[in-house]
Amino acid sequence: MAAIATIFVSFTTTSSSPFLTRLTSRLHFAAFPLRSPTRKLMSHTLARATLGLTHPSNIETPKISFGSKDVDVTEWKGDILAVGVTEKDLARDANSKFENVILRKIDSKLGGLLAEASSEEDFSGKVGQSTVLRITGLGSKRVGLIGLGQSPSTPSPFKGLGEAVVEAAKSSQASSVAVVLASSEGLSAQSKLSTAYAIASGAVLGLFEDNRYKSEAKKSTLRSIDIIGLGMGPELEKKLKYAGDVSSGIIFGRELVNSPANVLTPGVLAEEAAKIASTYSDVFTAKILNAEQCAELKMGSYLGVAAASENPPHFIHLCYKPLSGPVNVKLALVGKGLTFDSGGYNIKTGPGCSIELMKFDMGGSAAVLGTAKALGQIKPLGVEVHFIVAACENMISGTGMRPGDIVTASNGKTIEVNNTDAEGRLTLADALVYACNQGVEKIIDLATLTGACVVALGPSIAGVFTPSDDLAKEVFEASDVSGEKLWRLPLEESYWETMKSGVADMLNTGGRQGGAIVAALFLKQFVDEKVQWMHIDMAGPVWNDKKRSATGFGIATLVEWVLKNASKAN
């Protein structure tokens, strides 16, 4: 009798109240759909507040139950049996039969159909390749081969496996799927856990479609995924729950970035942050500062950016403290929170300016708040984390900041604004000073800061800047687990010469050359030298042009980094 253990991990919210996760006995993957704005509609701002009369729909999120099984793959009963194969797994013997044990077993049941089809369709096991066949002779209705490449050594191919499984399920309207690796016998126990985590994460994120702003949306039929041959028991159960917690944070982050600026104003972003604190009130507190309170703290740099908008700024500060035990390390995550960036008087114009996508200029804040949501579910001990966002819009009006204006940051440093479209660093300046004042030991800021970083590293790699080798090592170890791509760039101090002003302490932009480096050097002026600090420029990977949707970049890495610090503290 085959051993079967089912671990239920549901991805669910209630349709009647999309902001509260239903409490069940199942492990759950839960996202918080962005709620509609609740602003007061005063007569003189009625047209502005009801722009488009657009509100996100409360869509019930699909549920997936994950089960772990140790069963003969040819006997598994369901809609699709998906096999992850490397290029080596497709090796044939002298009789053109698969040498791989699992593929040979499946193919023998199908009378050689699998070998024949993979040859005819030129399936070689490369990443991104897949083929799905309708068959008889197995317990499943279909069998699919999904390529993992030569020898997968990172989470990305296995996340891709999970995504491909979901795509196959969507195409065939399948409700039950099993996933097995053609070669898993050589994996260590830890590698099996990590692989299961990556597959589950890829499946949940692949299933997610942001349909809140569509009048009609197809419903998913996929209900269960069985993972075969990667172990069973409490360790796997814990890993799958972790995948669910991180994925829910990523989905929340994607929803924030996807939401248009006429829905996600600075005030609504602050509401979403406060809701995290109220949902996880056992570990979170929230402080939201208005413009007057920010003025009392002398945040002239941040308020200068916000001055032109009718939507007032909101400075967001969430604080995570563990349920019990001592706090051994204090961290801060700071996210750029421009809910829309017009460029100000240096308005974005011309091809490639991407003004229509400037809703994603709060991608750094989405990463920070998505991480907060995930940690509210995980509840690590030994670590205190501050989540800080200076939320505002960069608009144009008679009260707006002009090129040539001088603003004064909360640490007293003065900045000559020679480009109002370099506004993110101005908001981050005061946010970083505020973070340092919380007594933290390490700070990571994330921002869609420069087009120069996209030119340097392309659309899928974030640039990393830090004077601390130790902090760099920690974050890159975390990104190895998450699969998110980072590349460390230099903080070349000689470039600071281009930032010198004749009338203030500094300019806010230098020349075109080395723009991402100069921006990082600017931020460095607002960080206490005693604090370990890293700047992540995520202007490229915040958005997927092919899918025309947010990625949720940074959240998986940040969660992993916080947990690594928590484990060191304990």
Image (tube, rainbow, N blue to C red):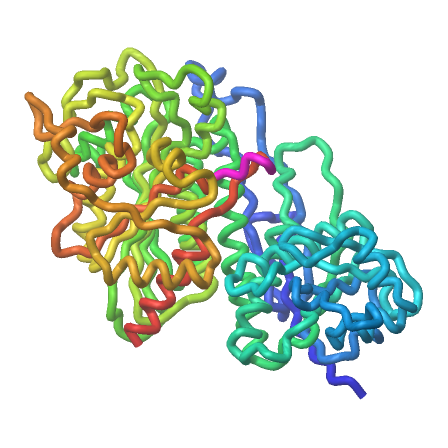
Q: Nearer the viewer, residue 152 or 258?
A: 152
Residue that sits furthest to the top in the current view: 398
On screen, residue 80 above or below 424: below
Residue drawn at the location 56% of the way across and 63% of the way down: 152
Indicate the position of residue 340 as horizontal and vertical percent values.
Answer: 41, 28
The kind of secondary structure the magenta stretch mainly shows is loop
Residue that sits furthest to the left in the current view: 503
Q: Quadrant of residue 225?
A: bottom right
Indicate the position of residue 479 as horizontal and vertical percent values.
Answer: 41, 58
| Image quarter hosting the C terminus | bottom left
Residue drawn at the location 83% of the way across and 63% of the way down: 115
On screen, residue 546 above or below 396: below
- Image-based side of 237 in relation to 133, left or right: left
Q: Is residue 12 visible?
A: no
Say if the magenta span includes residue 544.
yes
Say if the magenta span includes residue 387.
no
Indicate the position of residue 271 as horizontal and vertical percent values.
Answer: 42, 41
- Image-based side of 119 in relation to 16, left or right: right
Residue drawn at the location 41% of the way across and 15% of the way down: 349
| Image quarter hosting the N terminus | bottom right
For the record, the magenta segment spans 543-547
How many dots with numbers?
0
- Image-based side of 477 in relation to 255, left or right: left
Indicate the position of residue 397 as horizontal and vertical percent values.
Answer: 32, 13
On screen, residue 503 above or below 566: above
